[in-house]
Amino acid sequence: MATVSVTQNRVLSDDQIAFYHRHGYLILENVLSAAELQELRTATEGLREERARRGGADNIVAIMDFALLDEAFMRAAHHPHMLAAVTQLIGEHLRLQHCKLNWKPPTKGTGEVDWHQDFPFLPHTNYDLLACMILLDDSVPENGCMRVIPGSHLRGPVDHFANDGKFARRCTDPADYADDLARGNVVDLVAPAGSITIHHCCIVHASYPNNSDTPRRGLIYQIAAGDSIQLGGHLYKVWPIWLQGKDPLRARMENGTVHRLSRPLTNAGGLEPSES
């Protein structure tokens, strides 16, 4: 395949890079210009019919593959500031693993998401996999912002399976987050519209319900290093969109790691998205 040009900009400081590797997340405030933000909001409004078809007006909806539905979304996937930041975190060869628009409506008490990791939904050969969320609305606890447990990504994947062996879509052992909650080791990802949050595939996170009169819409781009290859799972994509760099034609394996797959490879086509 042809090589996609690689951004050479450095947008993260050494302290920000160290913070990400230590805590598992970053908040990049006010990345988008007013014009860029408005373009994406307009494109999102064009998906109202699709949103209603998938879940109605009063439920949280995840519209998968939204970047294929409007050129504005694909341009955002290649936003130079976002790609420059991701390059500094996981390298220059970057593949869009999947994308989804999370839309929490302004309906009192809807859209709460339980504690979970992204990785069990889409296990890869290594952990150079992260999610960038472009915030189309101010993100605060009142309208259902994300919450993370800092440093939890360093524990690796945790159990997401119920006692009957079925994939539960959440952390099934309270020990994986209860002590953190008791100690107050939780951070709300509060940021204004036009900001970008980044979180590691193994950070334990959740989100509040929306108890406000405003929506919380986020464009999530799950980005993998070129040599981080998907093994299976619920969010299984076979259309690798190369954001930059090229396919290194190799898989880098995490030493000594065995991953439990949430879905057999023979049934990989069924999509059951996680939320944030």
Image (cartoon, rainbow, N blue to C red):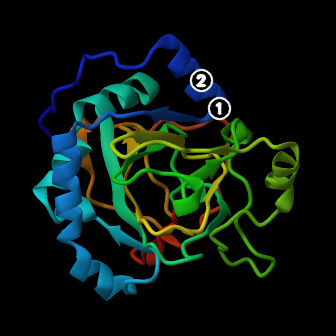
Callout 2 secondary element? helix
Q: Residue at x 34, y 57 (%)?
A: 99
Residue nearer the viewer, 150 or 216: 216
Residue nearer the viewer, 185 or 154: 185
Left or right: 67 in relation to 144: left
**In this view, 91 is above or below 27:** above
Residue 93 makes an appearance in the image: no
Q: Residue 193 in the image: x percent, y percent?
A: 37, 46
Callout 1 secondary element? helix
Left or right: 239 in relation to 223: left
Identify residue for label 1.
23
Q: Residue 192 in the image: x percent, y percent?
A: 42, 43
Q: Residue 150 in the image: x percent, y percent?
A: 69, 38
Which of the 4 image quarters holds residue 85? top left
Residue nearer the viewer, 153 or 138: 138
Identify residue for label 2.
19
Q: CA distance from mark 2 to mark 1?
A: 6 Å
Query: At label 2, which amino acid type do we have?
Result: Phe
Judge the density around disc 1: few (<14), some (14-19), many (≥20) Cα neighbours within 10 Å.
Answer: some
Q: Which quadrant would the N terminus be assigned to in this image?
A: top left
Query: At label 1, which amino acid type do we have?
Result: His
Q: Residue at x 49, y 69 (%)?
A: 234
